[in-house]
Amino acid sequence: MERKLITVEKSFTVVTVRVLPRSSRDQICGVVDGIILLRVSAPPVEGKANARCVTLLSKELGISASSVQIMRGERSRVKFFRIHGMSEYEIFKKLG
């Protein structure tokens, strides 16, 4: 059975993100098999790494932080983010 990594609805797109916390700096490492790889400097404690993920994605995509929301995986390294107002093509074009 094939897993869908990206879901596109009318007003938002859901993307899969793999997070590596406690890195030396915040950066997007690329996209592998439809999964966005992120490194964040924050530890995975009290939602700090999640907040950095939202900030990093919103900054790189050029949208407000309120347009990026965690749907699922708040306590996991693999997370699903809902991104409002952008298509799958626009997201991956900006992230390279």
Image (cartoon, rainbow, N blue to C red):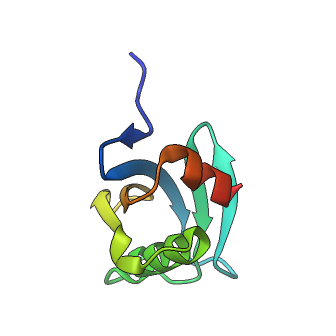
Residue in the image at 32% along x and 64% along y = 70
Mark count: 0
Residue 74 in the image: state x and y as whole percent: 31, 64
Q: Is residue 24 placed above or below 36 in the rendered structure?
A: below
- Near-viewer residue (72 or 76): 72
Q: Quadrant of residue 49?
A: bottom left
Q: Is residue 67 placed above or below 72 in the rendered structure?
A: below
Q: Quadrant of residue 30?
A: bottom right
Q: Is residue 30 placed above or below 61 in the rendered structure?
A: above
Q: Is residue 10 visible?
A: yes
Residue 24 in the image: state x and y as whole percent: 70, 82
Q: Quadrant of the N terminus?
A: top left
The answer to whether residue 29 is left or right of residue 57 is right
- Near-viewer residue (75 or 36): 36
Residue 11 in the image: state x and y as whole percent: 30, 52
Q: Is residue 40 placed above or below 93 in the rendered structure?
A: below
Residue 66 in the image: state x and y as whole percent: 33, 77
Q: Quadrant of the C terminus?
A: bottom right
Residue in the image at 60% along x and 56% along y = 37
Residue that protrudes farthest toward the top in the picture: 1
